[in-house]
Image (cartoon, rainbow, N blue to C red):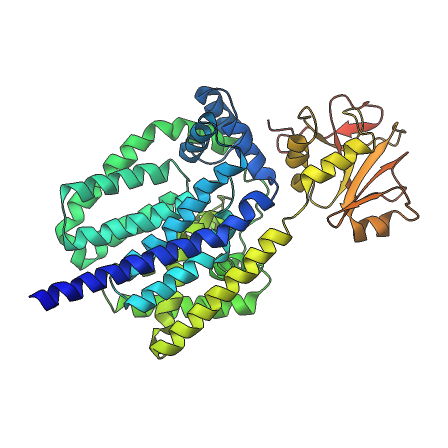
Amino acid sequence: MAATAAAAYRRAVRRIGIVSLLALLGASARLPAVWAHPLSQDEVFSARIATTHSLIGAFHRILRTESTPPLWYALAWLGSRLGAPLLDLRLLSVACGAALSAVTFLLARRFLGEWAAAAGAALTAVSYQPLVHGAQLRAYELLTVLVVALALLLALELREPRRALDVAVGATVWAGLLTHYFFVYAALVALIWTWLEPAARPVRRRVTVAFAVGAALAAPWLPAFLIQYRKDHFWWIARFSPAIVVTTPLRELVPLGAGAIGAGLLVLAVVVGGVVRLSRISAEARLVGALAVGPIALAALAWAAGARTYDVRNLVATAPFLALGVTAALSAVPRRVVATAAAASALASVAWLSLAQASLPGPPFARLAGDLVALGWTPADPIAVAGNVFTYRAPLEWYLPHGPLFDVSRPTGAGCGAVFVIARSRAFAEGLRGVRSARRDGGFVVDRLRRLPPRSRWLTILATRKTPRSCVRPLQSRNLAPLA
């Protein structure tokens, strides 16, 4: 008896140690980006919501500028009201990232060996989409951890159904539906599994009731959802593309684009092999396999039917299940080889991605804004940017003095008092020759010109309402009008 108790104690201590290390891995991989990266375009909108004086005002901003529900923004707003500095609010996502690694392990150890579960959770911790969004002022990491928590709660319901678990399932569904609309796909997959899985028959009705209660509590937000959807914030998403769908599992795990078809097909084949292997293990494993590919399939079907909402980052909650699918596919390899390779890959990924996040934070918007002011920029002066205009517009609005609002504009051909240009050095050198007064900062060039060069198609104009209309012509379509 004493020996059995001692063995159980040692197992519990070992699991607590593994969970703690995985949480530490998840947090440490995300922390370097929290204070190193400037706010991106989407994060600027989150920052405006978080710094709104009232919660009602924050909800109005959510309706006007966002395509997601309000829960995460409400948490960020509360943190801001309690005095947290703006960048520190990114720690909400870091905390979710740490919890994600731990919860993924607790789920996976129910049907995989302990070390295989740890390897899958470590792969989740450094998977590209969860890692990138795990240090941002956005809701993606909260969405991901809620989906994994829902899977764990359903697995617990199978073994020992009780009222507390029913309440937890309903609360998770409520929170997920109010965090991100793509939670619906994961919830539908989980509900379908509940009704098709023979082992879930004893808990089928109580789980369905819990889902229904959670959905009913979230339903008052539906009118707001319709308002957001009609604003067409997904206008930039192209028509259905099989290549993007096929490469989604790859792009959830590593930083490659939709053009990597060969690698995408390979990863998809590995994931499918893992899902097949999971289907032979247990009911919980079959749920994990369904959540790896089911939401992607449902989102792709909606996209093919005409709903242009498919985006790889919106499917970030599939990443932990894809990682477990890969782990299951590799479980046929000897354990020592898998553990060693997984540990080495995880450490290499953390080192490389952490270094990349800390040293390559993207456009240094705060310094670029300072360069513009130092060169004499005023709100009456247009700014010409090279590249994606949406990369620059909101961050420059945030970092420039007095928070100007920019119209995306075209030059009229008439002269302007001054034109300021921001471009990466190479693009700048190709378009403008003989520049001597330019400021170079973080791989970008900022300069003040008397007029735009004759060939300036590679430049897009940002102008405020104070810019003379004889100089620029604003493009005031619904998708280009300022969002503030």
**Does residue 328 appear to the left or right of 422 in the view shown?**
left
**Image spot of residue 93 (x, y percent):** 45, 43
Q: From where the camera sits, is residue 72 visible?
A: yes
**Image spot of residue 458 (x, y percent):** 79, 45
Q: From where the camera sits, is residue 211 visible?
A: no
**Image spot of residue 113 (x, y percent):** 28, 68
Quadrant occupied by the N terminus: bottom left
The image shows residue 449, relative to residue 14, as above or below, that is above
Q: Residue at image x 32%, y 46%? A: 187
Q: In which quarter of the image is residue 119?
A: bottom left
Residue ranking furthest to the bottom: 334
- Count the marks: 0
Quadrant occupied by the C terminus: top right
Q: Nearer the viewer, residue 231 or 249?
A: 249
**Image spot of residue 313 (x, y percent):** 50, 49
**Does residue 156 appear to the left or right of 383 in the view shown?**
left
The image shows residue 90, relative to residue 329, as above or below, that is above
The image shows residue 116, relative to residue 475, as above or below, that is below
Q: Which of 390 and 299 is in front in this view?
A: 390
Q: Quadrant of residue 216?
A: top left
**Does residue 202 appear to the left or right of 48 in the view shown?**
left
Q: Residue at image x 84%, y 27%? A: 471
Q: Residue at image x 32%, y 68%? A: 115
